[in-house]
Image (cartoon, rainbow, N blue to C red):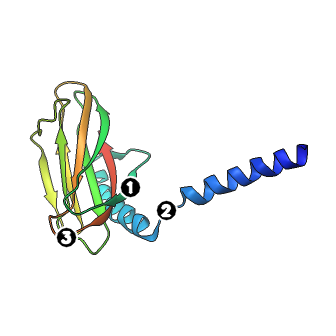
Amino acid sequence: MKRLLLFTSLLAAAVTVVCAQESDEQVQARKVALELAGAFSNDGFKIRDGHWTGPIKQGDKTVVAVNLYAGNQYWFSVGANQEVQHIAVQVHDEHGKPMPTEAFQGDDKAAAGFSPTISGQYFVSIAPPADASSTYCLVYSYK
Protein backbone atom coordinates (compact mmCIF):
# COMPACT_ATOMS: atom_id res chain seq x y z
CA MET A 1 0.00 0.00 0.00
CA LYS A 2 2.86 2.42 0.83
CA ARG A 3 4.48 1.69 -2.55
CA LEU A 4 1.24 2.43 -4.36
CA LEU A 5 0.86 5.70 -2.46
CA LEU A 6 4.46 6.68 -3.21
CA PHE A 7 4.04 5.79 -6.90
CA THR A 8 0.83 7.83 -7.09
CA SER A 9 2.56 10.84 -5.50
CA LEU A 10 5.51 10.61 -7.91
CA LEU A 11 3.17 10.24 -10.88
CA ALA A 12 1.20 13.33 -9.81
CA ALA A 13 4.44 15.32 -9.47
CA ALA A 14 5.61 14.18 -12.92
CA VAL A 15 2.29 15.16 -14.51
CA THR A 16 2.51 18.58 -12.86
CA VAL A 17 5.99 19.14 -14.29
CA VAL A 18 4.91 18.06 -17.78
CA CYS A 19 1.86 20.37 -17.69
CA ALA A 20 4.00 23.32 -16.60
CA GLN A 21 6.23 23.23 -19.69
CA GLU A 22 5.78 26.11 -22.08
CA SER A 23 5.16 25.64 -25.79
CA ASP A 24 7.64 26.85 -28.41
CA GLU A 25 5.27 29.73 -29.22
CA GLN A 26 5.16 30.79 -25.55
CA VAL A 27 8.96 30.64 -25.30
CA GLN A 28 9.30 32.76 -28.47
CA ALA A 29 6.78 35.32 -27.18
CA ARG A 30 8.60 35.50 -23.83
CA LYS A 31 11.93 36.05 -25.60
CA VAL A 32 10.43 38.97 -27.54
CA ALA A 33 8.86 40.48 -24.38
CA LEU A 34 12.10 40.18 -22.39
CA GLU A 35 14.13 41.78 -25.19
CA LEU A 36 11.76 44.74 -25.16
CA ALA A 37 11.75 44.96 -21.35
CA GLY A 38 15.55 44.84 -21.43
CA ALA A 39 15.57 48.12 -23.35
CA PHE A 40 13.74 49.77 -20.45
CA SER A 41 16.27 48.38 -17.98
CA ASN A 42 18.82 50.67 -19.67
CA ASP A 43 16.75 53.52 -18.17
CA GLY A 44 16.90 52.05 -14.66
CA PHE A 45 13.77 49.88 -14.75
CA LYS A 46 13.88 46.48 -13.03
CA ILE A 47 12.11 43.55 -14.64
CA ARG A 48 9.60 41.99 -12.27
CA ASP A 49 10.00 38.28 -11.65
CA GLY A 50 7.31 36.27 -13.35
CA HIS A 51 5.34 36.58 -16.54
CA TRP A 52 1.96 35.79 -18.03
CA THR A 53 1.70 33.80 -21.23
CA GLY A 54 -0.87 31.96 -23.27
CA PRO A 55 -2.85 31.87 -26.49
CA ILE A 56 -5.10 34.73 -27.51
CA LYS A 57 -7.72 34.35 -30.22
CA GLN A 58 -8.68 36.74 -32.96
CA GLY A 59 -11.16 39.29 -31.59
CA ASP A 60 -10.48 38.33 -27.94
CA LYS A 61 -8.74 40.30 -25.24
CA THR A 62 -6.73 38.96 -22.30
CA VAL A 63 -6.82 40.94 -19.07
CA VAL A 64 -4.28 40.65 -16.24
CA ALA A 65 -4.80 42.26 -12.81
CA VAL A 66 -1.76 43.98 -11.28
CA ASN A 67 -1.20 45.92 -8.06
CA LEU A 68 0.62 49.17 -8.70
CA TYR A 69 1.99 51.81 -6.35
CA ALA A 70 1.72 55.58 -6.69
CA GLY A 71 5.07 57.21 -7.32
CA ASN A 72 6.47 54.26 -9.28
CA GLN A 73 6.86 54.14 -13.04
CA TYR A 74 5.92 50.99 -14.97
CA TRP A 75 6.42 49.58 -18.45
CA PHE A 76 4.22 46.67 -19.53
CA SER A 77 5.96 44.80 -22.35
CA VAL A 78 4.13 42.29 -24.53
CA GLY A 79 5.73 39.96 -27.02
CA ALA A 80 3.95 37.75 -29.54
CA ASN A 81 4.93 34.92 -31.79
CA GLN A 82 6.21 36.00 -35.18
CA GLU A 83 2.97 35.39 -37.09
CA VAL A 84 1.22 38.42 -35.57
CA GLN A 85 1.82 42.08 -36.25
CA HIS A 86 0.74 45.01 -34.07
CA ILE A 87 -0.37 43.41 -30.81
CA ALA A 88 -1.92 45.99 -28.47
CA VAL A 89 -1.41 46.60 -24.73
CA GLN A 90 -3.45 49.02 -22.62
CA VAL A 91 -3.66 49.87 -18.89
CA HIS A 92 -7.11 50.30 -17.26
CA ASP A 93 -8.17 51.51 -13.83
CA GLU A 94 -10.35 49.50 -11.42
CA HIS A 95 -13.48 50.61 -13.30
CA GLY A 96 -12.15 49.55 -16.69
CA LYS A 97 -11.41 53.10 -17.87
CA PRO A 98 -8.33 53.24 -20.14
CA MET A 99 -5.48 55.16 -18.55
CA PRO A 100 -3.22 57.54 -20.50
CA THR A 101 0.07 55.78 -21.24
CA GLU A 102 3.24 56.22 -23.20
CA ALA A 103 3.12 53.76 -26.07
CA PHE A 104 5.65 51.74 -28.01
CA GLN A 105 4.58 49.64 -31.00
CA GLY A 106 6.79 47.20 -32.89
CA ASP A 107 6.07 44.40 -35.32
CA ASP A 108 5.61 41.56 -32.82
CA LYS A 109 5.79 43.59 -29.60
CA ALA A 110 4.21 46.52 -27.82
CA ALA A 111 4.63 48.35 -24.53
CA ALA A 112 2.68 50.78 -22.40
CA GLY A 113 4.36 53.09 -19.88
CA PHE A 114 2.32 54.24 -16.89
CA SER A 115 2.84 56.14 -13.63
CA PRO A 116 -0.15 55.78 -11.28
CA THR A 117 -1.12 58.65 -9.02
CA ILE A 118 -3.14 56.32 -6.78
CA SER A 119 -1.95 52.93 -5.47
CA GLY A 120 -4.26 50.03 -6.16
CA GLN A 121 -5.35 47.37 -8.57
CA TYR A 122 -5.10 48.08 -12.28
CA PHE A 123 -5.74 45.90 -15.32
CA VAL A 124 -3.53 45.34 -18.33
CA SER A 125 -5.31 44.23 -21.50
CA ILE A 126 -3.60 42.49 -24.40
CA ALA A 127 -5.25 42.12 -27.81
CA PRO A 128 -4.03 40.83 -31.16
CA PRO A 129 -4.98 42.62 -34.37
CA ALA A 130 -8.54 41.96 -35.55
CA ASP A 131 -7.36 39.53 -38.22
CA ALA A 132 -4.96 37.32 -36.25
CA SER A 133 -4.60 34.93 -33.33
CA SER A 134 -1.39 34.71 -31.37
CA THR A 135 0.52 33.53 -28.35
CA TYR A 136 1.47 36.37 -26.04
CA CYS A 137 3.77 36.98 -23.10
CA LEU A 138 3.48 39.91 -20.70
CA VAL A 139 6.29 41.08 -18.42
CA TYR A 140 6.54 44.34 -16.59
CA SER A 141 9.26 46.60 -15.34
CA TYR A 142 9.23 49.21 -12.58
CA LYS A 143 11.32 51.93 -10.97
Q: Mark 2: which amino acid?
A: Glu
Q: Which residue is mark 2?
A: 22
Q: CA distance from mark 1 to mark 2?
A: 9 Å
The secondary structure type at the circle numbered 3 is loop
Q: Which residue is mark 3?
A: 85
Q: CA distance from mark 3 to mark 1?
A: 17 Å
Contact (CB < 8 A) between labels 1 and 2? Answer: yes
- Work out whether mark 2 precedes mark 3 in sequence or the reverse, and give the earlier one: 2
The secondary structure type at the circle numbered 2 is loop
Q: Mark 1: which amino acid?
A: Thr
Residue closest to the eye, 114 or 6: 6
Q: Give how far across and how far down residue 78 sits, in percent.
A: 28, 57
- Work out whether mark 3 precedes mark 1 in sequence or the reverse, and give the earlier one: 1
Q: Give how far across and how far down residue 77 sits, in percent.
A: 27, 54
As drawn, the residue found furthest toward the front would be 1
Res. 84 image quadrant: bottom left
Q: Which residue is mark 1?
A: 53
As drawn, the residue found furthest toward the bottom would be 83
Quadrant of the rendering where the C terminus is positioned: top left
